[in-house]
Amino acid sequence: MIHRERVTPPHHIYPPDEWNYIEKQFTPQYLAMTETIFSTGNGYLGMRGCFEDGTPVVQNGTFINGFYESWPIIYGEDAYGFARTGQTIVNITDSRIIKLYVDDEALYLPRAALLSFDRRLNMKEGTLDREILWETPSGKQVSIKSRRLVSFEHRHVAAIHYEVTLLNASAPVVISSEMACDQSGQTGGDTGDDPRKARGFQHQVLLPQMNYTDNRRIVLCHRTNHSRIMLACGIDHHIDTECPHTHKSECSEDSGQVVFSIDAQPGKPVRLTKFMAYITSGTASSEEVCARAGRALDRSKDDGFGKLLTGQKQYMDDFWKRSDVEIVPDPEKAEKTTVEIAQAIRFNLFHILQASARAEGTGVAAKGLTGQAYEGQYFWDMEIYIMPFLMYTAPRIARNLLIFRYSTLDKARERARELHHKGAMFAWRTINGEEASAYYAAGTAQYHINADIMYALKKYVDVSGDREFLHKYGAEMLVETARFWSDIGFYSDRKGGKFCIHGVTGPDEYTAVVKNNAFTNVMAKENMRYAAMTVESLRNDEPDVFQSLVHKTGLEMSEVKEWTKAADNMYVPYDEETGIHLQDDGFLDREKWDFENTPPEKYPLLLSYHPLDIYRRQVLKQADVVMAMFLHGDKFSLEEKKRNFDYYDPLTTGDSSLSSCIQSIMAAELGYIDKALEYGKYAALMDLADIGGNVKDGCHIASMGGTWMIFPYGFAGMRDYDGRISFKPRIPERWHKLRFPLTIRGQQLVVDINRESATYLLREGSELVIEHEGEEIKLSKGVPVTKKLTYT
Amino acid sequence: MIHRERVTPPHHIYPPDEWNYIEKQFTPQYLAMTETIFSTGNGYLGMRGCFEDGTPVVQNGTFINGFYESWPIIYGEDAYGFARTGQTIVNITDSRIIKLYVDDEALYLPRAALLSFDRRLNMKEGTLDREILWETPSGKQVSIKSRRLVSFEHRHVAAIHYEVTLLNASAPVVISSEMACDQSGQTGGDTGDDPRKARGFQHQVLLPQMNYTDNRRIVLCHRTNHSRIMLACGIDHHIDTECPHTHKSECSEDSGQVVFSIDAQPGKPVRLTKFMAYITSGTASSEEVCARAGRALDRSKDDGFGKLLTGQKQYMDDFWKRSDVEIVPDPEKAEKTTVEIAQAIRFNLFHILQASARAEGTGVAAKGLTGQAYEGQYFWDMEIYIMPFLMYTAPRIARNLLIFRYSTLDKARERARELHHKGAMFAWRTINGEEASAYYAAGTAQYHINADIMYALKKYVDVSGDREFLHKYGAEMLVETARFWSDIGFYSDRKGGKFCIHGVTGPDEYTAVVKNNAFTNVMAKENMRYAAMTVESLRNDEPDVFQSLVHKTGLEMSEVKEWTKAADNMYVPYDEETGIHLQDDGFLDREKWDFENTPPEKYPLLLSYHPLDIYRRQVLKQADVVMAMFLHGDKFSLEEKKRNFDYYDPLTTGDSSLSSCIQSIMAAELGYIDKALEYGKYAALMDLADIGGNVKDGCHIASMGGTWMIFPYGFAGMRDYDGRISFKPRIPERWHKLRFPLTIRGQQLVVDINRESATYLLREGSELVIEHEGEEIKLSKGVPVTKKLTYT
């Protein structure tokens, strides 16, 4: 159910541009929001879209994925096994600043007379572009064009090309290119009462280590105080102009500036390129990270902005070829929402790319690199919401993320030992692998994280065919998670001897610490089943791999039997009378939430009601049983799905941004196309229309991944149980066409759907078997197959 | 079930003295424990039993009831409605220090050659007495006798009488009487991981306001930093000796000393009396509190130690007359345990007195004034465990405590409003009335606190007959708590339309946030029922009081109907198959705790297992259903009680010190006399034998109150439903006699039980109707009635 109509009126142009998200005027009232939306990043380095100029900044932010500070979690009342060490992504040295002075008048957007203004997130080329025409108080017209990019090719490098041209007069021009490491407000201001925002630090986080200037270059080096990670940030410059100019560089511990003074002449552009390099290391010395930053600057400067830009374009071309989802509105029925969604889907995919592309050795944070909310930590979002897109468009990135999880396996084993459980417990929220959840009821109790990771692992192996990954990393994780599940549950006489799991919290955080959360039990069952299957198949087919696995895990085959037995006997709560699966044992016993007397401003409920008040009622933050029915749809009949959806949907507030996309997909499966579209709109416009009212704190990357899923899984009706790809498309009337590519076991499938038929083309590869509405189709490269759609 | 045999071997003499708790040698290994046990206090002011001399102190502590510092509760992950302000009792200026030097040799107990040693808590006279004979390295023998008291008569005053006599030589003697306000380690050292201990402060708590010396007097004044309460502590001295002497006084912001130098001669005692006065105020100026401390010192000094001592003795005589519980062992079967219990019961009663006697305008803290554990806060202990003793021996104190709760009613109303509930929510833990629980699952969720207070209120009115209290304070609290219950529950179709209460935690904190906790529902039912009854009776019989109540609460009679309806329809979970009441809806669905594989050192479980692990199993920290069967025994049949007890007892760890006493009482009711005695022993010796291993952190005042209850309620089988007093005594074979007085509606009943019969004597009053084994007995003053006992 959608309880709110919170869509902020778009303040940008209409109709939207296909490939650019464009802002045609300076709108200070939306500054915090546009800082998020115009963020640039590459999955390693991210910069919020603050203007270069000395314009007011609401939430500044430059982030490196996994660059965090740790802090001891303090509990008013402590208990055994509570998480000990919080981790928060650090807002690091800001290198974007370029201040412009003409006739000693500063360009200050809120007060500047702007004859024209155009800022655009250029999703085709991967840049943030701005063109403005400024008339100074004395009537001099100044054209300022800038392009900013965070390089996908060179993940440590970013650059700004800044071009200033006086149009109608001469004037002394000063361009001050600056960098600053701000020690105040590490989390971008007061967090207020919103638990989703990052906490502030009580101590100085970045300790200066060294700094130097060298001609037009400045390098600042800091180290985090507690987590002891080294950071070097360097800037260097190339200036190209016919106008006479000089420069001067200086720096201190926490700041630096290179000031160019130019006698600018009309019509003669001043072109400044600012190269930025960021290096971090948990082991290297300050000298070493500074030297590495210097080398990255050397290389970038040698290449020049042009080459960086070319590389960026190539990367983007490749990305869109693998990933683009095209919606073509019916030209006769073209209306605003569809056009907006068509743009929004690209915006969403572009931001997933920016959050994940070069995330090597780290995860993908809930907000990507666009904000510090949720502390920059990694959650289940990554596996369940973001990875499907990656698996089907960039399996290498999906693999890297799974390897990151593998790198935390020892910490997960340690955590399990601490809590007297067998196997491994992956952290519900973390940066460095240690559990960082300070509220166990919606943290440690979300054991489903274990099964979520294994679900993604299986899907990755199924979709990519990468069995080497399974052998090298996957099997070990499967063994340890299956062990955990088999240990934490028990066979209950009161449930006919079934295997029950108590004291857990499912994805829906509006109930907590329950018995037999259906989602968790279904996921745990499949986790154990797949683990047993994997072990058996290794034992039979890969004796060396099997031996090594036994060696690494001390596995005994009796354990594998235990997993199978538990999986076969897993209890999934079901109510005979209503014919629905219960979110948890006692779900129906709860009082229903009084939606009628809950005014819109009380949403999200978590900001207006005590957890106890929420927990004791039938009310959902997000799809939970519905989610299980999506992830393991082959375990539920269509009638069950319908009954469950019909029961839970009206109880679902969608207070979580993870909700709408899943509701949309399941609505589509059930033939509720209007509802699917409505939920789809909410998911797709989550950030551009600021549905949650908190875009200022960062993009909702999981919802973005979910938005992608809406198209293949929702409207194209794709399912991929055990890697078998099937479709049952049904697209809204107002759409003319839906088109998207999928990478499947190294081959590339293009799916092209209109209202009447679907065409499947194997663009790359040799042969692929898929299913369309239950009919098997064998595709050969280059031969499109078209099939009619049945709307039942 | 008793899982542990943790009784620390008593290091004191045997057989125990009837009226003194005696230590016959200096035992540094038990220092922290004996500092607690030898504490002195009067309910307003408390001093841990640290030695006067410069002997090592493990946990120093001087406390004033309700004198607290507040601190913001920080949550790693915050949420709406979480408690905001912690409150912790402050370790204040220590005035007990008296250092002794003979020939410039310091008396330092760990190194001193002690020819004799005797320290005793003199429970007959209310003093802490010590006599030692010290031989200095040069062979001089020094007799040192001291008596310390915290006055019951003058609650702001304490005194130490310190007498030094050289026996066999002359020597220069220096007595340095000191005071110190220690700013470090406000909570007595590191709290480690034990959540029951007080947290440390991060800031300086006591800010110096003023200080002065005046002859042999010193006054130091401080103010708490955040809560802004003023404290003056003054000392003054009287010296009495034939030996020549001089003195010198000096003080600084946080310390002061008066140093007496004496030419001591053999056989001539030096008698020093140190008077101490403590004044606190939330409104007065530093000058004013200092002046008040000065006046208290003037008066004490004028009276002298003798008069203080006489007052103390009189108070104690009166106390024991009203309160003493005598157990006389069967002389033929006299064995250690019984003798120890006989002493322990006096020790327990004496400490309840020390925790509560002059608690005026405050509550009684979990540890009384013997330690900072549990932050010095007030819990339900006060009403359910401590107040029964007070109601039956000192109703005025019980009344004061209830009036303290009344003084927090407005804050309770505010808290209810904040959480969108009607009526009032009393704080689960607090000093100033504001909720201070930083862990809502075992805090705010323990709504039963509301009903607990109302239970005590009803019992107080029934036992004291004080209807004026009911009119002036009680009715208003009843209305607001009944409102709360009626608001928080709902009528559930799935429970046959019964009134259910979800999302609560009962007294047993080993399950949390459950549906229909039986204890809570039974208590809430009676809360509403009594509220409705009271309102109806006021409306009929006391129209003015009724009008005033309506005026104060905006009461409407339709509400009263709602309460009655909810009470009449209250759901109490019951399992038909086993015939037991369920601690909560899903209790039987849980896996049983694996006691067999839980080694003794893992108790208490809360220090070794994550809450989730405990919550998901059938395991109890303390009696819960069993508790309900005690408090509302007339609502359960004997068969039900037996089945419930038999089911829950083996699951009850007794990890809470509140458990054993209730198990003992119910065991007695069910005729399990051995078990009753065994549990009784654990309750009675909780502190003296350090059952919980944490006596060092303070006395278990609630268990002490529970220990008292074991005798009238357990072995004498007293029940007092609606104020009707009945007995069904059954005492253990090895006891010869059990004898105790009870104050009932202003009259005094003495109950005297031996193995064969019970004798009831109305010592004061005119007429009292009681019941013995179902037979009604009308007692007249001074006429004992003896009845045979039936052991069925």
Image: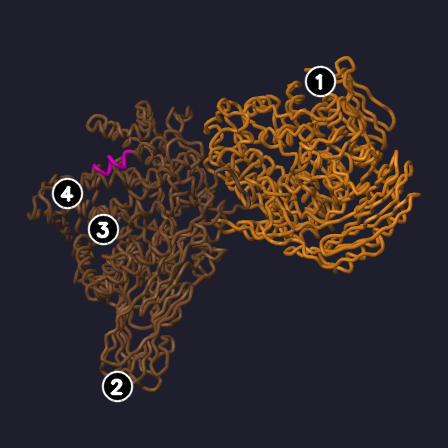
Chain colours: A brown, B orange
Tell me the subunit letter for badge 4: A
Residue A29: image tag: none
Q: Nearer the viewer, residue A534 or B245?
A: B245
- Judging by the rendered image, the residue that carries numbered circle 3 is A711
Q: Nearer the viewer, residue A160 or B378?
A: A160
Are the residues flagged by discs 4 and 1 from a single subunit? no
Residue depicted at 87% across the width and 47% down the height: B238
Amino acid bearing label 4: His
Q: Nearer the viewer, residue B72 or B435?
A: B72
Q: Nearer the viewer, mark 3 or mark 1?
A: 1
For marks 2 and 4 on the same chain, the one whose residue lies earlier in the sequence: 2
Residue A772: image tag: 4
Q: Nearer the viewer, mark 2 or mark 3?
A: 2
Task: Indicate whether A579 appears above or below B218.
Answer: above
Q: Work out how far the residue at label 4 is from the one at label 1, CA to CA, in angstroms.
A: 83 Å
Task: Verify CB contact (< 8 Å) between mark 2 and mark 1.
Answer: no
Q: Nearer the viewer, mark 4 or mark 1?
A: 1
Q: Quadrant of residue A259?
A: bottom left
Tell me the subunit letter for badge 1: B
- Judging by the rendered image, the residue that carries numbered circle 2 is A168
Residue depicted at 77% across the width and 32% down the height: B113
Left or right, residue A199 beside residue A274: right
For marks 2 and 3 on the same chain, the one whose residue lies earlier in the sequence: 2
- Judging by the rendered image, the residue that carries numbered circle 1 is B732
Are the residues flagged by discs 3 and 1 from a single subunit? no
